[in-house]
Image (spheres, helix red, strand yellow):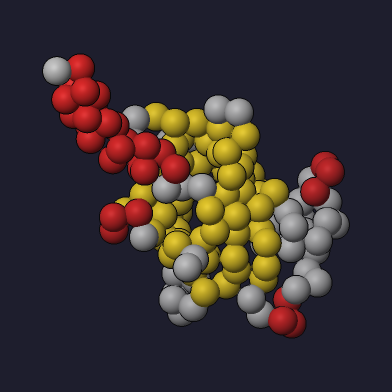
Amino acid sequence: MLRKALLVASALLLPALSLANGYVGQWYTVDEETHKKESLVTIWEEGDQLKGKIVEILDPASRNAVCEKCKGDNKDQKIEGLTFLWGMKKDGSQYDNGKVLDPKSGKVYSGSMKLIDGGKKLKLRGYVGFSLLGRTQVWVKAD
């Protein structure tokens, strides 16, 4: 009887665990207009939050770009290798209340993330103040 209860509990927990871990890994950022992959990013879990780093800029001509408009410690840092996503905390089936640095503008936005398309894509929303005032990117899970 106990064994059967454990099997049922395991079956119920597995989808939740795969969803939680589905954010962690490598993703391709995709340009909203051209739909071309721009960079490869890694998302990892640190404590109770998710963070993200730009691992590779796919355009060889842009690989040495620096964050000229960034402030503080990120000022003039190479964009490849830059931690641009931090503070994302679990909120139900998504992550929220994080920060997203746009290396092109140097601005830091509030952010939220949600898995879509069965975990094959990640929807990142950056916004100022309210979630309605912002921009959404859809990333593709790297193989």
Q: Which corner quadrant of the image does residue 113 belong to?
A: top left
Q: Name the side, left or right, on which 71 lies relative to 131.
A: right
The residue that appears at 27% across and 31% down in the rendered structure is 10
Q: Name the side, left or right, on which 1 lies relative to 100.
A: left
Q: Position of residue 12 (x, y in %)?
A: 22, 32
- Is residue 124 among the parts visible in the rendering? yes
Above or below: residue 115 compared with residue 3 = below
Q: Quadrant of the N terminus?
A: top left
Q: Name the side, left or right, on which 86 lies relative to 83.
A: left
Q: Which corner quadrant of the image does residue 35 belong to?
A: bottom left
- Is residue 127 among the parts visible in the rendering? no
Q: Position of residue 24 (x, y in %)?
A: 51, 47
Q: Position of residue 138 (x, y in %)?
A: 42, 60
- Residue sitting at the far bottom: 61
Viewer-side residue, 25 vs 28: 25
The residue that appears at 60% across and 68% down in the rendered structure is 39
The residue that appears at 73% across and 54% down in the rendered structure is 82
Q: Name the side, left or right, on which 41 lies relative to 112.
A: right
The residue that appears at 36% across and 60% down in the rendered structure is 120
